[in-house]
Image (tube, grey):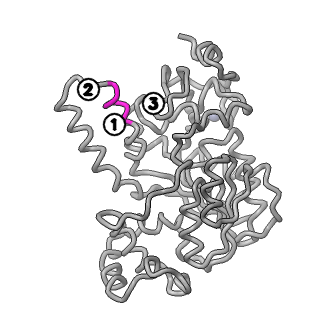
Amino acid sequence: MNPSALARDQGISVLPAAACYLCGSRGRRTHAGLRDVWLGVPGEWSFRHCRRCRLAWLDPRPERGELPSLYRDGYYTHAPSPEPQRRGAGTVRRLVRTATLPPESGRGARADVEGGAVERLLGRALARSRALKDVANGSVMWIHDVEPGKLLDVGCGDGSFLALMRDLGWDVWGLEPDPLAARVALQRGLRVIRATIEEAQLPGESFGAVTMSHVIEHVPDPIEALRASGRLLRRDGLLVIVTPNAASIGRYWFGHRWNGWEVPRHLFLFTPRSLRACATRAGLEVTDLRTTARSAFRMLPNVRAHVRLLSRWPPTSWAWSGCFSGSTWLEPAHPVARQPAR
Ligand SMILES: [Zn+2]
């Protein structure tokens, strides 16, 4: 079936996008017949891939004006995050965080951020594991060793990350184009502007850090978004990006069922190489680019779900959908770019 025809028939206007965003060469169609198992946006969608740039992109892709309609009420940024976990992985993350954050960043912070003496001791012991330390540092977007200043979170969703950073002493600002998600963040008393990074009129060279967590894969012009972020950064500021890794184990394991595709909201998927290329073209200097075990904690429920499915054959379509929705996070590898401005 022709994916663009189906999308148009079901009310979503699309544009053909056969050429690579980075080099202009015609991409190879690698995944076709993909459906939105998360929110049920209609259509069958497909991805192309450029061998030279290692970039994957949606073709055809929804027109810009259609993008807001792809995020329905069920999207995860629209509801307030549950209270921080007090058991299991949540506790480990919190304890390690108390040990890895510099003491000055805890000034005036709530007890659950700063931790008591026993918690700090336990946290220091757990932080001897490099993987655990990385996971904990990921909850502050790896800016744990930066003196708190002015922080902008692009696509801040419900604002849970900003609320944590505020407690750690940062002067926090958020950008969120989605009205429902922005409202939740505003209810937390956060400064949130309803705009994309390209639309927002913020003073240049004013932020010490700009963060983009699972945002760059949603924007129609990633290089322009990176350039706009760079303009907002102070001379020594950092831009930290987290995005699904199209060269990850999950991507190869699940193939076309990998939820990193998340059609039709993910317009691009990056490998470390293609992310570096975009940042460089945006005039940023890449100082660190690596994968992380941050989402590995989420592997366990997924593995359990797979075992359960295998014992109940054939699985219902609902079970498959639930299983692979969760598998978005079966992603031991997320590229992270930290960039000083100019
Ligand atoms: Zn290319």
Q: Within 8 Å of ligand 1, the CB of disc 3?
A: no
Tell me which label, 2 or 1, sits earlier in the chain: 2
Disc 1 element: helix
Residue 32 rendering spot, x and y as whole percentages: 50, 21
How crowded pointer 1 is (Cα within 10 Å; few <14, some 14-19, many 20+) is rated as many
Task: Inspect the magenta stretch and tell me whether residue 322 lies in it.
Answer: yes
How crowded pointer 3 is (Cα within 10 Å; few <14, some 14-19, many 20+) is rated as some
Tell me which label, 3 or 1, sits earlier in the chain: 3
Residue type (three-letter) at the residue carrying disc 3: Val
Tell me which label, 2 or 3, sits earlier in the chain: 3
Residue 315 - label: 2
- Pointer 3: what residue? 37
Q: Between marks 2 and 1, how big is the CA–CA gap?
A: 10 Å
Residue type (three-letter) at the residue carrying disc 2: Pro
Q: Between marks 3 and 1, how big is the CA–CA gap?
A: 10 Å
How crowded pointer 2 is (Cα within 10 Å; few <14, some 14-19, many 20+) is rated as few
- Pointer 1: what residue? 323
